[in-house]
Image: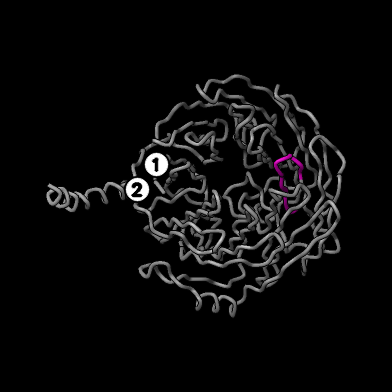
C-alpha cells in the first residue's frame, strides 16, 4: 500500500508543480482607465486599489487575498491618494485635471465604508484660486489616524507637458490636516525659501521640507503636525556643483519620469530624515539630517565606469540561467527608490535614458539593471545587489519595492518587445537574495508590464498588469495576477 501511494505521489507531482506555477489571473479587473494612483493594505487579507478612470472620475476597489472583489465605487474627481482613516477608507481628489491647469480646485475628501464600499461622507476641504499649476500629495500614517494633504504652487504655466517634468519650481506649499469630521485643521502656508527638492512625512505627521540654498547646501525644515512655524532645521553640504543638479518632478504630471532627488523620514527617530540624489557626473550622495540638533552626515560615491566594471565583475548570479546584468554608467543614472525599514536604508539606482524623439511619440525609454544598495542608520554600506533586469519601453516602468519583517521584496520588468517579470527577496540581515526568479505569465500578454502598485498580502501578492499606452497616456484595462510566496 505504501509503495502504491509513493508511486501515486510521483505520478501526481508534476501536476502539483504545474498548479503551483499557474498564477490565477483576473482578466479585465477594471474597465479602461488612465492610471493606477495607489494601492494600500486595509488588513492582512484585504487591499484597496485607487485608479483614475479619466481626468474627472476615479474608482476605489477592495479585493481580498483570494482575488474576490468585495466592493467597488466610482466617484467624481481626479484622484490624488487614498488610505485608511479611522477604520474606514479615505480618498482625496481634485475636481479634475487638465494639461494647462494641472489639478483643478477644489480639493475634496471622500469617506467610504471599509466593509460595504458605500460613501459615508463627501466634503470640500480646500479651494485654491492660484492661476498657475499645482501638484498635490496626500500622506497617511500606518495606523490610519492621521491624514495630511500637501499642495505645491509652481511657477509652471501652459507648456508642453513632457518638458515641465524636468523643472518644477515650487514657490509655495500648503499643508492641510484633517480631523475625524473631515474638517481642515492646522492649515499652514510655507514659502520654501530655496529650490524645493522634496517632502517627507513621518508617522507623527511631522512634515519635512527639503530645499537647496543659494550656497548649494541642502536645508531640511521640520513642521510639526498642527504648527505653522518650523520646530527645527538641519543644513548639510551635499557637494553640489550647481543648484540645478537637483530637480523635483511633478508627482501628478504625465508622463511620469522620476525626479532625481528622494527624501524619506526615519521610522524610529522623529527628527531624522534621509536624502539621496544622483548628480554631478554620476555622483551618488546620501545624507542623514537631524533637525533636532542641526547635524548631518553624508556619503558620496562615484558611480563611474570603473565602479560599474567592478560590481559587474563581482556579480554572482543566484541562478546561472539568468542573463548577465547590463549596468550603464551614463549621465542618466538616477535614484529610483529610497526606503527605510528595521534599521536599514535601501537605495536603488539605474540608468534611465530616452532614446529617439519622445515628444513626437517616436521615442522610447531604456532602463538598465537596478543597483540595490543597503546601509545602516549611520550610512555604512551593508550590502550591494544587482537585479539583472533591463527593458525598452514607451514610458518608464517603475519597479515595486516592499518591506515585510526583515526582507525587501522587489518586482521588476525586463525585456524589450516581449516582457518578463522578476520577483526577488533580499534578506536585510545578510544582504543576500533569499529568492530571485522569473514569474509565470500565463494569460498575461507578452507586451504587458507589471505596474508598480502591487497589492501585498501576508501570504502573497497581486500584480496589476497593463498594456503600453505611449507617451500620451491612453486608457487600458488592468489584468490582475495572484502569486504566492
**Residue in front for this viewpoint, 437 or 476:** 437
Q: Is residue 448 left or right of residue 152?
A: left
Question: Which residue is farthest bottom?
Answer: 306
Residue 395 seen:
no
Query: Image point 70% across, 53% down: which residue?
Result: 263
Relative to 212, say whether 180 is above or below: above
Disc 1 crowd rating (10 Å Cα; few below 14, some 14-19, many 20+) is many
Of marks 1 and 2, which one's residue comes earlier in the chain?
Answer: 2
Query: Image point 22% across, 51% down: which residue?
Result: 13
Q: Quadrant of residue 344?
A: bottom right
Residue 372 seen:
yes
Q: x and y percent of residue 476 in the render? A: 44, 41
Disc 2 crowd rating (10 Å Cα; few below 14, some 14-19, many 20+) is many
Relative to 445, say whether 37 is above or below: above
Disc 1, disc 2: CB below 8 Å? Answer: yes
Callout 1: helix, strand or loop?
strand
Q: Would you say residue 28 sits in the magenta stretch?
A: no
**Residue in front for this viewpoint, 467 or 413:** 413
Query: Image point 54% across, 72% down: which residue?
Result: 328
Question: Which residue is farthest front?
Answer: 1
Question: Rounded to the nearest whole Å, what is the CA distance between mark 1 and mark 2?
Answer: 8 Å
> Which label belongs to residue 479?
1
Q: Is residue 116 left or right of residue 330?
A: left
Callout 2: helix, strand or loop?
loop
Q: Quadrant of residue 98?
A: top right
- Residue highlighted by disc 2: 444
* Magenta stretch, residue numbers: 197-207
Relative to 314, say whether 292 is above or below: above
Q: Would you say residue 202 sits in the magenta stretch?
A: yes
Q: x and y percent of residue 430 in the render? A: 54, 63
Amino acid at each position: 500500500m505504501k509503495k502504491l501511494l509513493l508511486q501515486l505521489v510521483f505520478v501526481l507531482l508534476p501536476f502539483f508543480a504545474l498548479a503551483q506555477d499557474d498564477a490565477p489571473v483576473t482578466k479585465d479587473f477594471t474597465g479602461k482607465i488612465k492610471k493606477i494612483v495607489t494601492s494600500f493594505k486595509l488588513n492582512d487579507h484585504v487591499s484597496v486599489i485607487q485608479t483614475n478612470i479619466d481626468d474627472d472620475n476615479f474608482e476605489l476597489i477592495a479585493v481580498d487575498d483570494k482575488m474576490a472583489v468585495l466592493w467597488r465605487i466610482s466617484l467624481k474627481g481626479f484622484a490624488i491618494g487614498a488610505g485608511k482613516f479611522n477604520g474606514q477608507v479615505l480618498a482625496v481628489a481634485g475636481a479634475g485635471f487638465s494639461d494647462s491647469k494641472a489639478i483643478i480646485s477644489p480639493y475634496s475628501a471622500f469617506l467610504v465604508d471599509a466593509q460595504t464600499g458605500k460613501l459615508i461622507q463627501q466634503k470640500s476641504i480646500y479651494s485654491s484660486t492660484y492661476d498657475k499649476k499645482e501638484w498635490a500629495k496626500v500622506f497617511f500614517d500606518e495606523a490610519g489616524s492621521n491624514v495630511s494633504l500637501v499642495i505645491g504652487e509652481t511657477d509652471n504655466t501652459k507648456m508642453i507637458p513632457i518638458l515641465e517634468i524636468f523643472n518644477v519650481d515650487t514657490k509655495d506649499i500648503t499643508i492641510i490636516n484633517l480631523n475625524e469630521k473631515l474638517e481642515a485643521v492646522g492649515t499652514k502656508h510655507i514659502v520654501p525659501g530655496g529650490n524645493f527638492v522634496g517632502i517627507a512625512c513621518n508617522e507623527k505627521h511631522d512634515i519635512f521640507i527639503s530645499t537647496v540654498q543659494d550656497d548649494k547646501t541642502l536645508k531640511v525644515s521640520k513642521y510639526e503636525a498642527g504648527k505653522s512655524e518650523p520646530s527645527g532645521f538641519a543644513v548639510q553640504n551635499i557637494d553640489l556643483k550647481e543648484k540645478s543638479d537637483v530637480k523635483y518632478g511633478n508627482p501628478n504630471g504625465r508622463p511620469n519620469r522620476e525626479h532625481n532627488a528622494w527624501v524619506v523620514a526615519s521610522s524610529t527617530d522623529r527628527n531624522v530624515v534621509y536624502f539621496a540624489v544622483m548628480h554631478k557626473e554620476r555622483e551618488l550622495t546620501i545624507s542623514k539630517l537631524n533637525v533636532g540638533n542641526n547635524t548631518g552626515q553624508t556619503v558620496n560615491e562615484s558611480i563611474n565606469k570603473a565602479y560599474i566594471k567592478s560590481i559587474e565583475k563581482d556579480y554572482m548570479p543566484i541562478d546561472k540561467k539568468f542573463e548577465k546584468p547590463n549596468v550603464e554608467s551614463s549621465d542618466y543614472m538616477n535614484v529610483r527608490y529610497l526606503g527605510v525599514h528595521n534599521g536599514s536604508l535601501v537605495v536603488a539606482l539605474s540608468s534611465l535614458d530616452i532614446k529617439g524623439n519622445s515628444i513626437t511619440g517616436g521615442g522610447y525609454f531604456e532602463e538598465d539593471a537596478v543597483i540595490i544598495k543597503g546601509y545602516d542608520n549611520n550610512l555604512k554600506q551593508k550590502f550591494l545587489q544587482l537585479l539583472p533586469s533591463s527593458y525598452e519601453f514607451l514610458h518608464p516602468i517603475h519597479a515595486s519595492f516592499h518591506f515585510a519583517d526583515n526582507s525587501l521584496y522587489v518586482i521588476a520588468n525586463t525585456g524589450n518587445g516581449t516582457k518578463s517579470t522578476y520577483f526577488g527577496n533580499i534578506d536585510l540581515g545578510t544582504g543576500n537574495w533569499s529568492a530571485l526568479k522569473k514569474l509565470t505569465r500565463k494569460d498575461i500578454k507578452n507586451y504587458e508590464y507589471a505596474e508598480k502598485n502591487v497589492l501585498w498580502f501576508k501570504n502573497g501578492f497581486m500584480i496589476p498588469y497593463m498594456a503600453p499606452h505611449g507617451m500620451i497616456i491612453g486608457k487600458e484595462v488592468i489584468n490582475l495576477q495572484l502569486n504566492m510566496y
